[in-house]
């Protein structure tokens, strides 16, 4: 798909609190309310007349009337090369729209709409999801603003994100982190069972858990009982564990009143969903490494193995 080169980028809130999002996505439209502003005057570009109408006939204050006219001007005059964005379902959605503005008389929806060219999309042009949590703060700033339509700060950077462009510095950072993770995994694989247990304890301690006791388990495993406030967790650090052993662990653990159950081991690969226990977590070494790095334990690993 050809990369975007829009003339403008605007955020649009699809209804109060985004209440129209699902309908607009399904129908392929963008909607704006401001029912107090006559469509025929807006279509004719009579902005000053609309402003005076809102003040004298509708009782709006001057500032509110000016803001409304600014939103109407964008909605009616920005062409089909404007990128419209909105937020919902934990994603950023974007689309371009036909220039024609149509009045809407149906209750429960906006007073005017434009039809989207193609469809709303929640991925970049390479197909990668535009997850809200992964976006820079300035891109999601409109969520805390009161405007129905407003410009986006650093819009060129956002368009680059939608186009699938990758910041060279971010590429370098991601590659460096991937290398660091690979080294950390190699270090973890050198830990003996006692050191592996200590690492697991440190990871949990980073989240506020403290050990109550450590009990020897079957086949050389170590069962850690941890507490955090009123919660209790059973953590089994297992050097080798297959599916049958994991099922046995969960079967025994269900007999006790633990809030969380975690099995950690080099051979653990099965997803927790396979065991239908929402309390349970299954960590292979890759998951342990990810959590250890999040907890700032790379230095500990280097010193321990060194």
Image (spheres, rainbow, N blue to C red):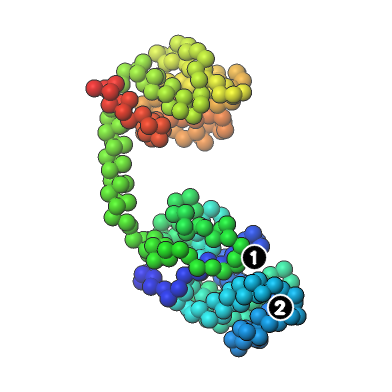
Q: Residue 76 at x, y = what percent? A: 56, 80
Give the class, few, some or many, for how many residues have Cα within 10 Å of label 1's Cα (few <14, many ≥20).
some
The quadrant of the rendering that contains the C terminus is: top left
Which quarter of the figure is the N terminus placed in?
bottom left
Front residue (pair 107, 144): 144
Q: Please say whether residue 107 is visible from this viewpoint.
A: yes
Residue at the image position 48 percent from the left and 78 percent from the top: 80
Of 64 and 93, nearer the camera is: 64
Q: Residue furthest left?
A: 306
- Would you name the residue on which mark 1 appears? 15
Where's residue 74, x and y in %? 54, 76
- Give the answer, above or below, for where 2 lies relative to 200: below
Query: What SS does tag 2 mark?
Result: helix
Q: Which mark is residue 55?
A: 2
What numbered label is drawn on residue 146? none
- Which image quarter: residue 253? top right
> How crowded is the residue under tag 2: few (<14 C-alpha within 10 Å), some, or many (20+)?
some
Between 7 and 112, the one lying in front of the other is 7
Q: Is residue 110 left or right of residue 217?
A: right
């Amino acid at each position: 798909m050809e990369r975007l080169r829009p003339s403008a980028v605007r955020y649009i809130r699809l209804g109060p609190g985004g209440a129209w999002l699902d309908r607009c996505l399904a129908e392929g439209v963008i909607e704006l309310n401001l029912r107090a502003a006559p469509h025929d005057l807006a279509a004719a570009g009579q902005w000053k007349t609309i402003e005076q109408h809102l003040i004298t006939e509708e009782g709006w204050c001057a500032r509110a009337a000016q803001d409304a006219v600014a939103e109407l001007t964008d909605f009616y005059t920005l062409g089909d090369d404007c990128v419209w964005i909105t937020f919902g379902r934990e994603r950023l959605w974007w689309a371009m729209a036909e220039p024609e503005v149509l009045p809407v008389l149906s209750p429960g929806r906006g007073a005017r709409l434009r039809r989207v060219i193609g469809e709303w999309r929640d991925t970049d042009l390479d197909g990668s999801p535009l997850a809200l949590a992964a976006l820079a703060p300035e891109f999601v700033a409109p969520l805390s603003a009161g405007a129905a339509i407003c410009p986006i700060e650093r819009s060129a950077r956002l368009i680059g994100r939608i186009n699938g462009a990758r910041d060279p510095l971010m590429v370098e950072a991601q590659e460096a982190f991937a290398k660091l993770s690979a080294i950390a995994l190699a270090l973890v694989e050198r830990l003996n069972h006692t050191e592996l247990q200590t690492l697991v304890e440190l990871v949990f301690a980073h989240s506020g858990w403290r050990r109550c006791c450590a009990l020897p388990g079957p086949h050389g495993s170590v069962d850690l009982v941890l507490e955090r406030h009123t919660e209790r967790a059973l953590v089994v650090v297992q050097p080798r564990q297959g599916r049958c052993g994991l099922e046995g662990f969960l079967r025994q653990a269900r007999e006790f009143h633990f809030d969380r159950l975690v099995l950690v081991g080099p051979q653990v690969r099965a997803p927790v969903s396979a065991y239908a226990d929402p309390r349970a977590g299954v960590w292979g070494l890759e998951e342990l490494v990810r959590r250890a790095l999040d907890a700032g334990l790379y230095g500990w690993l280097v010193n321990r193995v060194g």
